[in-house]
Amino acid sequence: MNRFLISLFAVPSLLTLIQSCAVNFSSKDASVQAQQTHQMNHNSGEHSSAHHHQSSTHSHSNHSSESASLTKAQLTKPAEIAVNKPQTFLIEIQDKTGKTITDFETFQEKLMHLIVVSEDLDVFQHLHPEYDGDGLFKVEITFPKPGSYTLVTDYKPIGISEQVSVLNAELPGVQLTSSLKIDKNMSQILEDTQVTLTSSQPVLKSDQEVTLKFNLKDAKTNQPINDLKPYLGEQGHLVIFKQSNPLTKADYIHAHALKNTPPDEVHFMTNFPEPGTYKVWGQFNRNGKIITASFWVTVS
């Protein structure tokens, strides 16, 4: 591990990124196996990673407790984690024996993807930790408010299937008590872009493949946009979390855009494994500016 980076922290400690169980940043350091096989199957550019599901189009491994753990990830944190302050976190990747993994494959143009969401699903961040060598990644995270956060890390060591790690972080401070507000509006305006969400099914049902369709128009002219650019190598990316407390790996879905769609539309094929309330985030690149649209959906 890079000793210079570690010296940045007053009281460095190690936490293991674990899946499907909560870890409090203020708890004592622990090291446990954290990974299970995460196999994604690309078919003609179509990619979806809804967990606990297999279909004729996409293949996904089941992340049960019996699945073999291939890697583990350890987190080094600052001595104190402050709200609204950018702070650097270090993530070290090891195999299940504790040996550092140093070689990684690029997928979706990055070596690692990190999704950060708050427990109420109000905060969403899609970050890309930088590789510092010797199995060590570093990332700067700003937590905008106190409370519980879920961090989902995707990375792919060479010769190993894509790995997913989940960490639940508790940020100190007084939380405002307010009831969760679920906006059922399926259209929103984000600066100069209007985004509307529809689906291939009038009623979303669990354990059935569905195509989610994002339509993008210019907010001023109400005309279809023609300046959509690739984002991380694709027309867009979709992240979905099931409303749950605590959030676990089973609540997480990550899908990628289908090809050959109209220039003002981005489609995603996915599957909701269980009934419930989900929040979806669609991310698009409009002429160099990343647009993140979010919607609540109900699955029966």
Image: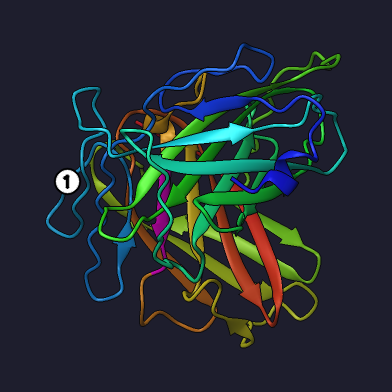
User: What stretch of residues is rendered in magenta?
Assistant: 253-257
Residue sitting at x 58%, y 34% = 75
Q: Quadrant of residue 76?
A: top right
The crowd level at tag 1 (other Cα within 10 Å; few <14, some 14-19, many 20+) is: some
Residue sitting at x 40%, y 60% = 103
In the displayed structure, 241 sits above or below 180; it is below
- Percent x, y for residue 66? 18, 24
Q: Quadrant of the N terminus?
A: top right
In the displayed structure, 251 sits above or below 127; it is above
Relative side of 111 to 286, left or right = left
- Answer whether residue 296 is visible to the viewer in this image: no
Relative side of 13 to 155, left or right = right
Query: Who is closer to the viewer here, 293 or 8?
Result: 8
Residue 256 magenta-highlighted:
yes
- Percent x, y for residue 104? 41, 61
Kind of residue at badge 1: Gln
Q: Report which residue position mark 1 lands on.
A: 54
Query: Who is closer to the viewer here, 181 or 164?
Result: 164
Relative side of 94 to 119, left or right = left
Residue sitting at x 47%, y 57% = 198
Q: How many marks?
A: 1
Residue at the far left in the pictured view: 56
Residue 54 magenta-highlighted:
no
Q: Quadrant of the C terminus?
A: top left
Per the image, label 1 sits on a secondary structure element best described as loop
Residue sitting at x 63%, y 63% = 195
Q: Quadrant of residue 255?
A: bottom left
- Percent x, y for residue 91? 57, 42
In the displayed structure, 94 sits above or below 194; it is above
Magenta segment, prevailing SS (helix, strand or loop): strand
- Percent x, y for residue 167? 53, 29
